[in-house]
Image: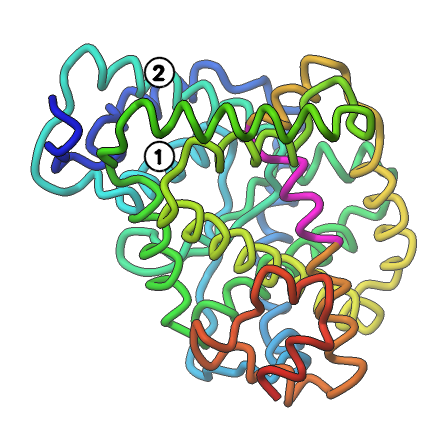
Amino acid sequence: MSPAAKSSFSVGRAVDWNLAATVGGKLARPEPPATDYTRNQAIDQLTEAARAAEIPVREVTGLSEGGEIPEARILNRPDWIRAAAQSMRAMTGGDGEGRPGVISGRIAGAQTGAVLAFVSSGILGQYDPFAVGGGELLLVYPNVIAVERQLHVAPADFRMWVCLHEVTHRVQFRANPWLAGHMSGALAVLTEDVADDVTHVAGRLAEYVRDRRKHADDEASEPNSTGVLGLLRAVQSEPQREALDRLLVLGTLLEGHADHVMDAVGPAVVPSVATIRHRFDQRRQRKQPPLQRLLRALLGIDAKMAQYTRGKAFVDDVVTKVGMARFNAIWTSPETLPLPHEIDEPQRWIDRVL
């Protein structure tokens, strides 16, 4: 195909999503051993905690959309993989017209399933704004059980603490419906086929390599999340780089805001919140085996961990200076979201927006 001939197929249509779900379910790591009593107790407590967390989160954020409190969906690892594959299908245009090539679609499906299997053992919960029939809060109970055991914390407190973070995401999206469209628009740009000449892509990649060499003395020899993101940006078109920046900034804001709310609400509803936060932060920072560090870097997991830290620092700073009510101007439109450089310089966002 010539460079000018752009394909009408998106990334989503090039993946066999049913195979991705099947492969992911088979490759998922075994769940922590637990009795039926422990599993049922975790499911019941997470269900109740997701419901109970809603009101204090609305009160702290000032983002009360009113109405009924939606029920969370409590899943095991294979269930989460199937839900994630279904969401990614919708998010990337996989429900549109057109069918993937049989071989390429199955290869891509198997690769995607392997990635979902790796992620499924670490994710505690998420709010899925692209779920069929509307947004949905997902909580992965085997992982919650595994982490609370690792941290040696009170299970009921930890389950509520996790729900405070994830329910904040539910409130963010339900109170500001435009966020899902903003996110899907950026994803559409990232996943669309581009017609860049190979020489242009190679030129950008060479420029990136030269720049990395200049800073080689200051970088670790192993791949890191910053380096992987830089490599990704090097082969992207300018619209794709701008879309990636929008997604990274939005993700940093959403995660930092949720962490801020979690700590603001925590003392009132989670007696051992200080202990949980301390031990959880230590867990985030612990050293990983080399292969796991590589996989985490390639999948952007370490970059996501940085989002929590940078995003929370931004939200903490702005809320301290202007209060939550004025901070909420950030949810007005895409134009009031932070610009990339403003995440680390909150005063510049205050000056521009407020």
- Residue holding disc 1: 85
Location of the C terminus by quadrant is bottom right
66 or 44: nearer the viewer: 66
Location of the N terminus by quadrant is top left
Overall secondary structure of the magenta section: helix
Write the start and end of the magenta stretch as one range: 299-309
- Residue holding disc 2: 110
Residue 11, position as x, y percentages in the image: 27, 33
Residue 194, position as x, y percentages in the image: 25, 36
The crowd level at tag 1 (other Cα within 10 Å; few <14, some 14-19, many 20+) is many
Residue 23 shown in magenta? no
85 sits to left or right of 229 = left
Residue 160, position as x, y percentages in the image: 70, 58
Above or below, 293 against 57 in this view is above
Q: Secondary structure at mark 1?
A: helix
Among the two numbered marks 1 and 2 on one chain, the one whose residue lies closer to the N terminus: 1
279 sits to left or right of 85 = right
Residue 37 shows up from this direction: no
- Residue at 51% x, 19% y is 28
266 or 239: nearer the viewer: 239
Q: Secondary structure at mark 2?
A: helix
Q: CA distance from mark 1 to mark 2?
A: 12 Å
Q: Which mark is residue 325?
A: none
